[in-house]
Image (cartoon, rainbow, N blue to C red):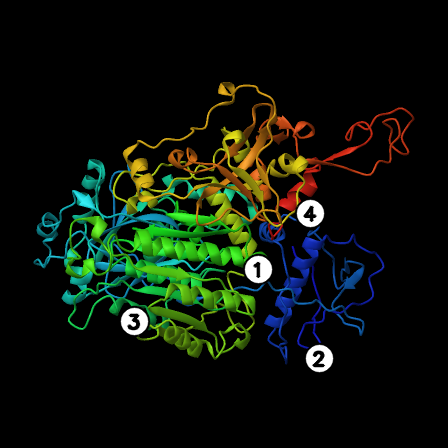
């Protein structure tokens, strides 16, 4: 029974509620716990506000209750919540030495508002609502991870997680890319879906893997309609033969829908098998970026809620957003972006509708945090609807699209990028390692690498013959080598001082046809100078070009509200760089596929990750450094005697000689020659030969005219007796055979890559089964307060049970509580 109380009043002279104190009764009861006290305060406040004789109802400040406290409050199992009194006698409850009663006094404690800021965006909810008629499920539980969805024009489906999208009928768009069904919808009579199903050829289908994390704007699938002229301009999508069991499942699902009721029909298949969901296990900060706790029915929901929960739990790893959720935002393309993208798309054809001979070259530039990377991804996907291959030059080394931090890279892309940058790492066509997240430490080397990549595009990628010879060429030739490839360049966000000079040098050397400059009306300091466009015209006039590039201002988009509240404030640029590095190193190693020249840089295989096995327990490659041309350390002066200590346990780039078209062709034919990494047992135990080291200041970095970067690696350990680097890398074997250089920059390996996230509590605590005290390179010498292996204040001669003999060694990770606290920090250092 709750205690009897007198009539209570609250005096409200301020915006918050003041709960006042009074003298206690003669018999002082035991003080309540913090949980019970908060419950008491909440109950007291609600009773007063609900009282009909209350003249003025003040605004009540919400109390900040932790999740564990909330569960205890809801369960009502607090042992301190059993107070009772008889008659008119009141109980006085002490809360943190402040007594609470019904009559107030002047010395009343104020409870400060500690509300957690919540970002709720109703526009980030799907307009598609599941019913019994627009979603088809498999009747057999053998393969429950496939559903069929029918949508009408204009409906949107927002989701978090990962999924394979298989378009079957009509058209839909996602992140700028238009997905076309296997066949156009055939008009049939009502209630006769079988005839429509027979007209669909399901032997080959197009499958698009889309990964939508909450670290970025969530993916939106929208049903659209295209006119016949627009449909004819779309490049035919790549299709593959599907397994027979999937074909049978799709045919069974199609029989459940009346196809005449929908403009777009597509299947959603589980993509959890790619392994990307495991990234949440590696870093606690990233928990929940892809997965959502599944909804459960409690038995009293209406039919709409039941259908919603069924769709949410139908496909593993696929979580549709069907009601408002905290701290998420869906991708919304502003009208100014749409107009700018359409300008670029229209430039691919002339006034007669024929495809132009010279493909466009577009540059995206502007300040930081304006949406340049997202806009570049959108125009890349949109151009893939017009061209079978699109070149992408990544100049933003801090937030790269397809490679880890520190690399400028040229890519030849054949499939759309339907996800955040860390969800689609690619092996570049050619790349260079700058070694930092900004070019300010070595701008000359940075611009030299960018210019070499532009030269590579014009010389090897954009076309295979001269422009004069291509005048008589037919673009629709079946020969891939005759295809022209447009170029998209994403620049860095450093546009002040030296950064602005670097941008102008890039534009002058590239001679783009289109420039998209981001502009923010609310943040003038982050905008390009007002003289930017006039400078471009002067550049074009000085270079003798007929006309300046087509320049378009693009409005910057800032997600959030007036209080700068955004769903992405939790994740900093350092977190995104750590995500990209972890995604890169946890890839399953895949070699390049066979095919034409452009296919050498693009893998058509579905990306696979393996987060079940930590990096610290993986078997490394062994590489003899005696076969390397040299070792470079950027930005640091390292004595030659210390070079192996610096490289040990570090993140490095692996370089090789510049590859020609003949080298790539030899890779594809399987006739490439090179030194294959060998096992340690096969290496002779010769005298130590130090690596060929090029100290900073005496020698420049690897020249971009003669080298290329094949990718990044972790030097897990070094065996000097056999001149062996033990390296962990996802670089394909055909590239590993051509390595001849190591470059170390200022980019460091995330600390979580050094830990074993799969540690079994039943085994000895440590890394990969090795106790903490025996793990190398994870300790440091502390100041010694010991003498002869004794602790201060301890009996003479007693050794430290934790730190051992003097000098003491503090083992990183030996303090479990501190380790958990540090690993759970918001920033990844």
Viewport quadrant of the N terminus: bottom right
Mark 2 sits on what residue?
13
What is the secondary structure assignment of the residue under circle 2?
loop
Q: CA distance from mark 2 to mark 3?
A: 60 Å
What is the secondary structure assignment of the residue under circle 1?
helix
Query: Which one is in front, 686 or 755?
Result: 686
**Which label's residue is closer to the chain start, 4 or 2?**
2
Image location of residue 49, percent across then percent down: 61, 72
Q: CA distance from mark 3 to mark 1?
A: 33 Å
Q: CA distance from mark 4 to mark 1?
A: 62 Å
Residue 578 located left or right of residue 26: left
Residue 510 located left or right of residue 698: left
Is 824 above or below relative to 50?
above
Residue 804 located left or right of residue 516: right
Mark 3 sits on what residue?
343
Image location of residue 559, percent across then percent down: 48, 67
Mark 1 sits on what residue?
440
Tell me, yes or no, whether the two marked residues, 2 and 1, touch with CB atoms within 8 Å. Answer: no
Q: Nearer the viewer, mark 4 or mark 2?
A: 2
Image location of residue 672, percent across then percent down: 34, 33
């Amino acid at each position: 029974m709750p205690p009897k109380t007198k009539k209570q009043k609250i005096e409200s002279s301020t915006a918050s509620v003041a709960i006042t104190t009074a003298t206690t009764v003669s018999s002082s009861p035991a003080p309540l716990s913090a949980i019970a006290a908060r419950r008491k305060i909440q109950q007291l406040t609600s009773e007063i506000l609900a009282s009909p004789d209350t003249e003025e109802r003040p605004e009540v400040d919400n109390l900040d209750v932790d999740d564990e406290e909330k569960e205890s409050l809801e369960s009502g199992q607090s042992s301190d919540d059993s107070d009772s009194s008889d008659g008119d006698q009141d109980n006085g409850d002490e809360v943190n030495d402040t007594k609470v009663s019904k009559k107030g006094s002047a010395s009343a404690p104020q409870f400060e508002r500690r509300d957690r800021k919540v970002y709720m965006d109703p526009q980030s909810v799907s307009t598609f609502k599941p019913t019994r008629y627009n979603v088809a499920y498999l009747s057999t539980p053998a393969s429950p991870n496939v559903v069929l969805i029918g949508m009408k024009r204009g409906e949107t489906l927002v989701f978090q997680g990962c999924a394979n999208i298989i378009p079957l009928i009509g058209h839909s768009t996602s992140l700028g890319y238009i997905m076309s069904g296997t066949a156009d919808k055939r008009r049939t009579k009502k209630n006769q879906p079988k005839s429509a199903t027979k007209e669909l050829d399901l032997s080959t289908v197009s499958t698009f893997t889309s990964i939508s994390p909450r670290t970025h704007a969530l993916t939106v699938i929208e049903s659209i309609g295209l006119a016949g002229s627009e449909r004819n301009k779309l490049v035919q999508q790549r299709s593959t033969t599907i397994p027979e069991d999937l074909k049978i499942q799709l045919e069974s699902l199609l029989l459940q829908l009346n196809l005449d009721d929908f403009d777009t029909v597509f299947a959603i298949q589980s993509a959890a098998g790619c392994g990307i969901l495991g990234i949440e296990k590696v870093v606690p900060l990233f928990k929940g970026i892809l997965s959502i706790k599944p909804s459960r029915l409690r038995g009293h929901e209406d039919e709409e809620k039941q259908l919603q929960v069924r769709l949410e739990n139908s496909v593993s790893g696929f979580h549709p957003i069907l009601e408002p959720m905290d701290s998420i935002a869906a991708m919304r393309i502003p009208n100014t972006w749409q107009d700018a993208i359409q300008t670029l798309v229209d430039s691919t054809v002339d006034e007669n509708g024929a495809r132009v001979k010279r493909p466009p070259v577009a540059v995206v530039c502007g300040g930081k945090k304006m949406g340049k990377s997202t806009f570049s991804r959108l125009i890349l996907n949109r151009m893939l609807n017009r061209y079978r291959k699109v070149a992408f030059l990544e100049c933003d080394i801090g937030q790269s699209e397809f490679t880890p931090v520190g690399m400028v890279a040229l890519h030849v892309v054949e499939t759309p990028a339907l996800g955040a940058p860390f969800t689609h790492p690619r092996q570049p066509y050619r790349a260079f390692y700058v070694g930092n997240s900004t070019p300010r430490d070595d701008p000359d080397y940075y611009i030299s690498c960018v210019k070499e990549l532009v030269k590579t595009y014009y010389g090897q990628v954009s076309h295979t013959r001269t422009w004069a010879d291509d005048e008589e060429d037919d673009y629709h030739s079946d020969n891939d080598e005759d295809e022209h490839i447009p170029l998209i360049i994403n620049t860095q966000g450093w546009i002040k001082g030296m950064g602005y000079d670097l941008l102008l040098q890039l534009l002058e050397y590239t001679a783009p046809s289109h420039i998209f400059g981001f502009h923010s009306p609310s943040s003038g300091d982050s905008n390009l100078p007002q003289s930017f466009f006039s400078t471009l015209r002067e550049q074009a006039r000085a270079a003798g070009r007929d006309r300046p590039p087509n320049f378009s201002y693009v409005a910057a988009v800032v997600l959030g509200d007036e209080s700068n509240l955004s769903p992405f404030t939790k994740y900093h640029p350092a977190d995104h760089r750590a995500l990209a590095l972890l995604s890169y190193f946890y890839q399953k190693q895949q070699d390049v596929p066979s095919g034409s020249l452009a296919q050498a840089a693009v893998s058509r295989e579905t990306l696979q990750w393996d987060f079940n096995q930590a990096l610290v327990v993986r078997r490394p490659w062994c590489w003899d450094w005696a076969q390397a041309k040299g070792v470079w350390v950027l930005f640091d002066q390292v004595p030659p005697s210390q070079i192996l200590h610096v490289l040990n346990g570090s993140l490095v780039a692996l370089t090789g000689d510049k590859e020609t078209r003949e080298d790539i062709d030899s890779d594809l034919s399987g006739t490439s020659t090179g030194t294959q990494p060998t096992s340690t047992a096969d290496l002779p135990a010769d005298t130590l030969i130090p690596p060929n080291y090029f100290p900073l200041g005496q020698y420049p970095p690897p020249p971009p005219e003669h080298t290329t970067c094949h990718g990044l690696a972790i030097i897990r350990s070094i065996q000097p007796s056999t001149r062996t680097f033990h390296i962990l890398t996802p670089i394909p074997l055909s590239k590993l055979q051509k390595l001849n250089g190591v470059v170390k920059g200022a980019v460091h390996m995330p600390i979580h890559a050094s830990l074993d996230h799969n540690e079994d509590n039943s085994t000895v605590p440590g890394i990969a089964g090795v106790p903490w005290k025996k793990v190398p390179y994870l300790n440091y010498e502390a100041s010694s307060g010991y003498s002869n292996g004794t602790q201060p204040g301890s009996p003479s001669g007693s050794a430290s049970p934790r730190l051992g003999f003097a000098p003491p060694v503090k083992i990183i990770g030996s303090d479990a509580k501190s380790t958990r606290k540090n690993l759970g920090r918001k920033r990844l250092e």
